[in-house]
Amino acid sequence: MNSTAPKIRVACLLGACAVTFAGCQVHQPGRVETAVAQGFKRTLSVGGKKDPNPFPATEENIHAGQKNFSQYCMVCHGLDGQNTGCRLRTGCLLRCRL
């Protein structure tokens, strides 16, 4: 048996581990990553954009929606509604109760 075969296997395994772990660093997403994520979110993952709102846009309904959002949704979705709340920062897992 060839004595270099185990060395090659070990080298390949170490190389695969290095490539895998090099990609696991935390960093701010770049413009391309942000554009891809925003495009995916706006076209594929968010459904019901064309569904009509069952509530008319009265001042009372808007105020009630703002109150409900601040009580039930803002913790995870953040003030801007873009998932900037505690769920992403601290890892708390809260379920939406709609």
Image (cartoon, rainbow, N blue to C red):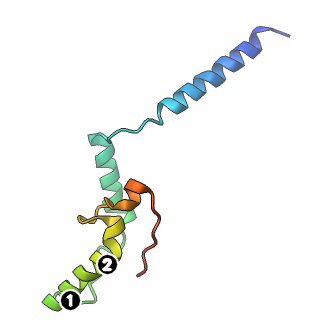
Residue at the (33%, 43%) spot, across then down = 33
For label 1, count other residues whose C-alpha is less than 10 Å away and answer few (under 14), some (14-19) or many (20+). few
Q: Is residue 27 above or below residue 16?
A: below
Question: Which circle, 2 or 1, is nearer the viewer?
Answer: 2
Look at the numbered discs 2 and 1 and tell me whether their residues touch, using CB distance below 8 Å.
Answer: no
Amino acid, disc 2: Gln
Please identify the residue farthest to the left as the structure is shown.
Answer: 59
Residue at the (33%, 61%) spot, across then down = 83
User: To which residue does mark 2 refer?
Assistant: 71
Secondary structure type for disc 1: helix
Mark 2 to mark 1: distance in Å? 15 Å
Please identify the residue farthest to the top as the structure is shown.
Answer: 3
Q: Is residue 3 above or below residue 67?
A: above
97 or 55: nearer the eye? 97
Label number found at residue 43:
none
| In this rendering, position of residue 60 left or right of residue 19 | left
User: To which residue does mark 1 refer?
Assistant: 61
Q: State the image quarter where residue 80 is shown.
A: bottom left
Q: State the image quarter where residue 65 is shown.
A: bottom left
Residue at the (40%, 39%) spot, across then down = 26
Residue 54 x/y as whole percent: 28, 89
Please identify the residue farthest to the right as the structure is shown.
Answer: 1
| In this rendering, position of residue 62 left or right of residue 87 | left
Residue 59 x/y as whole percent: 13, 88
Task: Assign the N terminus to one quadrant of the image.
Answer: top right
Residue 61 x/y as whole percent: 20, 89
Residue 91 x/y as whole percent: 45, 57
